């Protein structure tokens, strides 16, 4: 996932560099700020769910490339756009650094100096989670899908933005050993004859709020 994301970012950046002739519609953003995770819920099969309190905030950063569609003679002329975004942050819970590629649809009120905008996108968060329960004590990779909603205002080349992320992640990396018991002998007695490994699913949901500042090229 990280290699694919890096290749997409490089390709889109090169495309942006070649399309400078249409700067008013093509945009490239870089941003940084803080992410506040309200809390996470972790559940493992056959284990009670684990709730983690909200974090105090963590550094977040990323980039976005997009294009405002021309749509001449339409009410949405130069107001509707599409974008690809990659962000990273550490929720400071049992879930470690989360990398989130997202595909966005955005709308704006076009203006030269002050321009508000709003978007909604499909997010694909991925990260590692430390799972500590009565049975498990492992670090597993988790991937999932979610929704991300950015809302901000551009002032000149700079912008202020709030974004909301709700993600649902899961992993099948956990496994446990199960004893196979058979009834043998006379009188019949239960006897452990073998062991096998079974895959155990773990699930997590995460809700985070971002406050970032950035620059648009």
Image: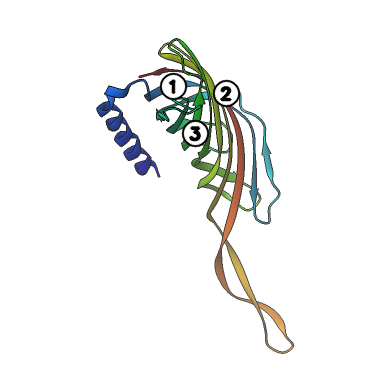
Q: Where 67 sits versus 175, above or below?
A: above
From the image, state whether disc 1 or disc 3 is nearer to you. Answer: 3
For image coordinates 71% across by 49% down, the residue present is 48
Pick out the residue farthest to the right: 187
Instruction: Residue under label 3, please give it.
Output: 105
On the image, the x and y values in percent for residue 114 come to: 48, 11
**Residue nearer the viewer, 4 or 198:** 4
Instruction: Residue under label 1, please give it.
Output: 31
Circle nearer the N terminus (3, 2): 2
Quadrant of image for the N terminus: top left
Tags 3 and 2 touching, CB below 8 Å: no
Q: Where 185 sits versus 156, above or below?
A: below
Are there few (<14), some (14-19), or many (20+) residues within 10 Å of tag 1?
many
Residue 217, by quadrant, is: top left
Instruction: Residue under label 2, please give it.
Output: 57
On the image, the x and y values in percent for residue 27 come to: 38, 24
Let me know if residue 99 appears in the view: no
Tags 1 and 2 touching, CB below 8 Å: no
């Amino acid at each position: 996932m990280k290699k694919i994301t890096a290749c997409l970012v490089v390709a889109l950046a090169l495309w942006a560099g070649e399309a400078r002739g249409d700067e008013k519609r093509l945009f490239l953003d870089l941003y940084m700020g803080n992410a506040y995770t309200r809390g996470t819920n972790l559940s493992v099969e056959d284990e009670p769910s684990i709730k983690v309190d909200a974090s105090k905030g963590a550094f977040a950063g990323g980039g976005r490339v997009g294009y405002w569609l021309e749509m001449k003679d339409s009410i949405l002329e130069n107001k509707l756009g599409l974008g690809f975004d990659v962000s990273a942050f550490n929720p400071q819970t049992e879930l470690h650094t989360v990398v989130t590629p997202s595909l966005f649809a955005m709308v704006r009120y076009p203006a030269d100096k002050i321009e508000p905008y709003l978007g909604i996108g499909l997010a694909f968060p991925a990260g590692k989670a430390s799972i500590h329960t009565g049975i498990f004590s492992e670090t597993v990779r988790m991937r999932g899908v979610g929704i991300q909603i950015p809302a901000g205002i551009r002032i000149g080349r700079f912008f202020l933005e709030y974004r909301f992320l709700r993600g649902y992640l899961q992993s099948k990396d956990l496994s446990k050993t199960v004893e196979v018991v058979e009834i043998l002998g006379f009188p019949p007695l239960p006897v452990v004859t073998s062991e096998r490994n079974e895959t155990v699913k773990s699930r997590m949901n995460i809700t985070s709020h971002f406050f970032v500042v950035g620059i648009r090229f």
